[in-house]
Image (tube, rainbow, N blue to C red):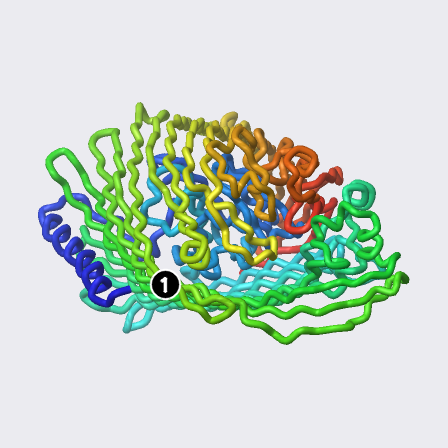
Amino acid sequence: MNPSTRIELTTTAALLAVITAASAQDAMTPIDNTLEGLTVVGSAEEIWTLPGSAYYVDTEEIREHGYTSINQVLAKVPGVYVREEDGFGNFPNVSLRGADGTRSQKVTIMEDGILTAPSPYSAPAAYYSPKVARMSGVEVLKGSSQVRYGPHTTGGVLNFLSTEIPDEATFYSRTTGGSYGTFFNHTYYGDTIETEAGRFGYLLEVMAQTTDGFRDIDGGGDSGFDLVEPMIKLFWEPNTALKQRFEFKFGASDQEADETYLGLSEFDVRAFPDRRYAATRFDSFDSEATRTYLKWIAEPSDLLRIESAAYFNTFNRSWDKLDQVNGTSLHQALLDPARVAVLNGSAAGTLRTTDNMRDHEAFGWQNQANFRFDTGPLAHDLAVGFRLHYDREDRLQQRDTYTGNGAGNFALTGATPITFGGINEVFATALFVEDEIKTGRLTLRPGVRYEFLDLDYTNSGWSQFSGNENLFMAGIGANYELDDCNSIIGGIYRGMSSPAPNAYLTAGTEAEESLGYEIGWRHRRDAFSAELVGFYTDFDQLISTDAGFGVGAPSQNAGEADIIGIESLVQYDAGQAAGWALSVPTYVSATWTSAEFKNTTSFLAGGGDAVYQGGRDGNEIPYVPDWKLAAGIGVAGEKWGVNLDMYYVNTSWGTGFNGDSRAALTGGTPTIRDGKIDALLTFDLTGHYQVTENVRLVGGITNLFDERGIVSRIPEGPRTNAPRMWFTGAELTF
């Protein structure tokens, strides 16, 4: 990117801030008296005034249900679909309103408002995701009014809120053990101290989880993982004339997992859902991540608030996994009984493993200023922001060959040197302006976002490609309060999701575009609340991703899609309504979605490895079921509580082909990735008992009735959901 262009863009943002600050001198509406960091939703209460559909999960809900996987959290949220992969949520695949959920690439994932995907622009596949069990909350934003939160605005926003620094000395520790040797611990200690120099706060935290895994490898071996995530957070609010706060956070993640890409044959996945073939015993995933930010928050006046953050994240992973048997791709080999016999060790043959090593880094500087002022009867909360961001992905690869003797043993017979696979780099300059305008009971939130991307790609032969891309997004949301109990929301929004540099520069892949509409109704009265929202999204230049398939080819455009849906959430506490000593919270969440391709490209219909491959006009987008339902009921007294939750999804398809035998109809390559994803109904039971003021016993059973079904056919063949698992333990709070 030309340096003068960067200066011009930054100067433009600064001028906008100065001009708007000047116009705010006569303002009359003070900013909320807090120096905590900006959030996407804020709280469950604030959803009532948002001009768009959103959901907020607080600390109590996470602890009450014993959530350790983001998939568990999102199962309740209407309009959100998740595809399970490893059974523990370590590799999330999240789809908001039908956008492609593969590795959550179309979702802007943040932690404390900072981009947290390994390389959000150059390689956004979420092989790392924050662990929800250590969070104080999770925010989900769907629909309109997303211009603040790029880069991927066709799918929505997922913001994790890390543990807050407590106002007084606090020690907390939750320890549980359970099925398959699973151990979990989340411990932190923090305090806020008043000094002559100002207020100082600190938090020391560690979260650890380990399990032997529930899958049984032929011939023995673990299929679990070990994960440790420590964090330190500090803040200082100096005694100065300027009201300000400095906040620093450093967190790390270290994970070792005996995880594989390989699934099972169609027969084995039904007969032995927890089986893993002997050939996968050498598969392993190792990763290390760091996340760091330094924030400065200031309120020069009651009408002006500024937040500035510099951040630096790293992520390195090595996934050494089986990818061929007798020279055949695994998703094809699983259709051949002779090759399956090699995989399970009962026949002699040759295996190949590939270790995909990736080094990621991302750093940047983001800023937002909020100005409050009035113009006649209109009250404004104008947000102006810009971000300078750089991220890169370096690729290395190594392949090994093993020979099986037909008696369950495999010997290393060949190894190749580590080879260079390429570098993707993006420097992004993002600007946005969004104004929240209130008059009477009406709130409008128009906004625009612009991103300039400077892209570089170095291929495996060290040839270099460069280019740039301009992305423009805009939208407007509205909220009208009919009375104290009812409100109407609506909006229209243009979203975009850019391809990786190698796809854009070498394959001509264009940015995915969407035009989304939503309209809805909210109601709340005492112990009852309800929300009903209809949405329609018109996608253009869909990006057919190959993330998680190991093929290495750049993604390409796949045509268009229409997604229409209805989502609702009803919550009621009969105990609160009747004035009982017991609370009886209940909820019902429902989502209906129709997601279909149109104007498909020859690339999409021609067959291949990407998840959309084999698609034709009118086919359903894979992994987006028509119906998703969730319901729950709880009973809680002064010292105890029990919750029963139900989750249901109906059938969907594993690829865009929407059938079981692609070769029979199109002449394409047969693959076990084609086929149905099962409808599934599961129940979770959790509870707690408060022994003393400081000690609480916790426990639960997930998948209470041990219902099993195929939940994924990718990366390399069908696999099932996790079986029934139990946990029990205690929480200590001092």
x, y percent for residue 234: 40, 68
Residue 61, quarter of picture:
top right
Where is residue 645? Give x, y as percent.
63, 36
Judge by depth and name the residue closer to the eye, 165 or 89: 89
Question: Which corner quadrant of the image does residue 287 belong to?
Answer: bottom right
Task: Say if residue 594 shows up in the picture.
Answer: yes
533 with respect to 287 (left or right): left
Residue at screen point 58% across, 72% down: 419
**Residue at (34, 30) in percent of width and height:** 490
Query: Quarter-wise, where is residue 679 in the image?
Result: top right
Q: Residue at x 58, y 29 (%)?
A: 627
Amino acid type of disc 1? Ser
- Residue denoted by label 1: 466
Image quadrant occupied by the N terminus: bottom left
Helix, strand or loop under label 1: strand
Furthest residue in direction right, as rendered: 407
Q: Looking at the figure, which quarter contains the C terminus? A: bottom right
Please, is residue 527 above or below residue 87 in the view?
above
Residue 212, image x and y in percent?
A: 74, 60
Q: Along the line of sight, which residue is nearer the eye, 503 or 667?
A: 667
In the figure, 460 relative to 331: above or below? below
Viewer-side residue, 299 vs 527? 299
Give the farthest residue toward the bottom: 417
Residue at point 10% right, 48% down?
A: 23
Q: Residues within 10 Å of mark 1 (few under 14, many from 20)?
A: some
Say if 36 sits above or below 480 in the image: below
| Residue 230 visible, this orientation | no
Report x, y in % for residue 267. Answer: 81, 42
